[in-house]
Image (cartoon, rainbow, N blue to C red):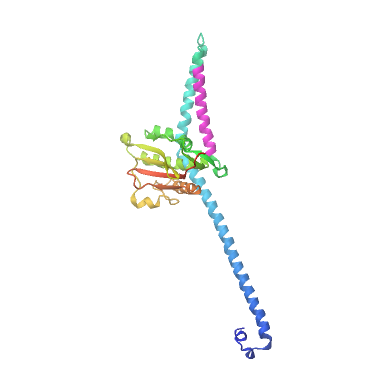
Amino acid sequence: MALDLGGYQALLPEWMHLPTSHTIFWDSIASAFLFSFLTVLYFFMANRRAMRVLQEHQARMVASSKLSALGEMAGGVAHEINNPLSIITLLSTRLKQLVSARPVELAALQRVAIDVESNTQRVAAIVRSLQAFARDGSQRPVEPVLVADMVSEALGFCRERFHHHRIDLRVLPISKDLVVRGRQVEFTEILLNLFNNAYEAVSRQAPNDESERWVEIEARHADAFVEILVTDSGPGVPAKLRDRVFEPFFTTKSIGQGTGLGLSASLGLAQRYGGNLRLETSSPATCFVLALPRLERG
């Protein structure tokens, strides 16, 4: 073909002269195009399969992280439910006494009934939160979420755990104007992981240091974001490990005490909504900051 196109047709057999070489040329172009197309198609399909596997792996990581966080908070949930149940038991005894007394004190009966209803609603709220947390939050609609509500829901799983182990839980007032957009159950999952990590860090301190065993939760405006700060009095993250805390499967806990998925999964959830999760290295105490895009209330 090169000889033909270069003007050396005399050196070629008649069947390879220009008309046939043109055919060969265009056949070669078509073959090259078809080969390139099939190659691109192959790599495209391979990339799609790889992305699907990666998404499935990430979903399993999130599920594993959720179960791990809930399992580690199970003791706190038990305390949250046992306390109102104990109160209801005492109130039922009081109710029997009031009913058997003569004359019946209607005002006292009404007060006991109100207390029973209040504690029953408290247990029901915890159970609803557990059910919501256990479901796949990614299937829920995206909607405005009050930051105060998501913090309150997350604390519902673990407040008693802090109290039971004499850790001072400081929740600064949260403005009702702090609103983000997303799925509350997924935001609750992030906060639950942060609260759990803070509890684990502070619980390593000596019991006689109760005055110094604390976890503080704060929410604030930060330009176009809402920042939720979870600060604790624990020993902190060593400087050499700070760049690794968000790596999947990296953990400073003992074997069998953590999956190393909590922070990496939480970072992924925050980024899904245009937010971020970081370790605030400028803070004198250990401080993780969850930043989510702020939603202006119209």
Task: Please state the horizontal and vertical placement of residue 258, each as a whole percent of the image.
Answer: 43, 45
What is the x, y in percent for residue 135?
A: 55, 41
Q: Is residue 272 above or below residue 29?
A: above
Residue sitting at x 36%, y 36%: 214
Closer to the camera, 153 or 149? 149
Eyeballing the image, is 171 above or below 237?
A: above
Q: Is residue 34 magenta?
A: no
Q: Is residue 123 left or right of residue 161?
A: right
Outermost residue to the front: 298
Question: Number of labelled discs?
Answer: 0
Where is residue 79 shown, x and y percent of the image?
45, 31
Residue 257 can be seen in this image = no
Q: What are the residue bounds of the magenta stretch?
A: 110-133
The outermost residue toward the bottom is: 10
Quadrant location of the N terminus in the rendered image: bottom right
Q: Residue 161 versus residue 37: which sits nearer the camera?
A: 37
Position of residue 56 in the picture relative to residue 235 (left or right): right
Can residue 99 be seen?
yes
Q: On screen, 107 above or below 21?
A: above
For image coordinates 60% across by 64% down, the residue present is: 41
Tell me residue 151's x, y (percent). Answer: 46, 37
Magenta segment, prevailing SS (helix, strand or loop): helix
Q: Residue furthest top?
A: 103
Seen in the picture, residue 234 relative to 29 is either above or below; the reply is above
